[in-house]
Amino acid sequence: MLLLPPFIILSVFPVLPLSAGDVGLARLEPKKDGYFGLNLDWANDSPKQVYRRMGFKPKVYVRFFEFPMSDDDFAILDESAKLVKPHRALLLVTLEPWQGLSSVTQEECDRHTKQFKKVSSRAKIFVRFAHEMNGSWYPWSQQPTAYKEAFARFAESLHKNARNCAMIWAPNYGGGYPFSGGQYEVKPDSPDYTILDTNHDGVVNKLDDPYEPYYPGDEAVDWVGMTIYHWGSSY
């Protein structure tokens, strides 16, 4: 379980075995136990300071980046890997395509995953790509067709180029779905509206499946995660 302050819990569970030689373990799955991690205020804190304060070494540290990442972002990611390496920890990188899903081109996917391969030689990386896609508050929200294509494109590139990395598919907890009123709420005239109307009653509402339409497939997903906000669908 990964705790993200102030009020978010992200739980992740492995999905896929790699091969018979991997004894059924998914990418980055520990042979025993699990991972506990933190999302630091990186400007004012560090893994070293966490250990001094708390007396234990978290196994995962979280960082957020806008996608596409800049050269400066990759430098920050590499520095983060250097900081967690002495603690034998992993990085969990949340990639946010604020420019929209059209920005997830093959060229950008390959550019990122080749950089991730370099960084993962210091610290292995979980990639939490375009999280909370079933919400209505992000530019990548409630667009299942484009979302699944983008996720699968990035995952294929990552699996090809960076073995020490794994993909996390992380929707928001479905309480309050479809989170009506958000800026990016699916519109009835969108082709995706029909896809999200999973019970085929003509409307997208709380009776529809908040997860399955967004799932990009077992080949793309290594771990399943979930974001849970403590206040539910309203304060």
Image: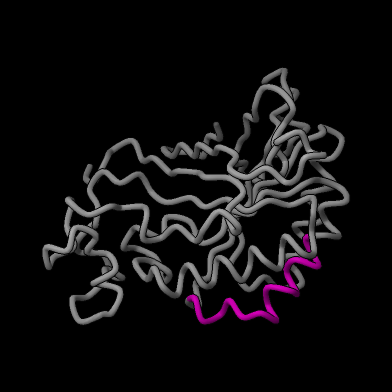
Q: Quadrant of residue 72?
A: bottom right
Residue 117 is left or right of residue 186, and the answer is right
Image quadrant where one finds the N terminus? top right
- Residue 151 vs residue 2, the one in the foreground: 151
Q: Quadrant of residue 17?
A: top right
Q: Is residue 58 above or below residue 28?
A: above
132 inside magenta stretch: no
Image quadrant where one finds the C terminus? top left
- Residue 6 vs residue 106, the one in the foreground: 106
**Image point 67% across, 66% down: which residue?**
156
Q: Position of residue 92 (x, y in %)?
A: 65, 47
- Residue 5 vs residue 173, the one in the foreground: 173
Q: Position of residue 35 (x, y in %)?
A: 65, 30
Residue 180 is left or right of residue 184, and the answer is left
Write the start and end of the magenta stretch as one range. Answer: 101-116
Residue 69 is left or right of residue 96, and the answer is right
Q: How is the image coloured?
A: one colour
**Image point 30% across, 74% down: which residue?**
192
Q: Position of residue 49 (x, y in %)?
A: 74, 31
110 inside magenta stretch: yes
Q: Position of residue 183 (x, y in %)?
A: 28, 70
**Image point 44% across, 39% down: which residue?**
8
Q: Please state the total of marks drawn on the protein image.
A: 0
Q: Is residue 13 above or below residue 163?
A: above
Residue pushed farthest front? 20
- Residue 57 vs residue 135, the one in the foreground: 135
Q: Is residue 34 above or below residue 235?
A: above
**Image point 84% across, 40% down: which residue?**
85
Secondary structure mostly seen in magenta is helix
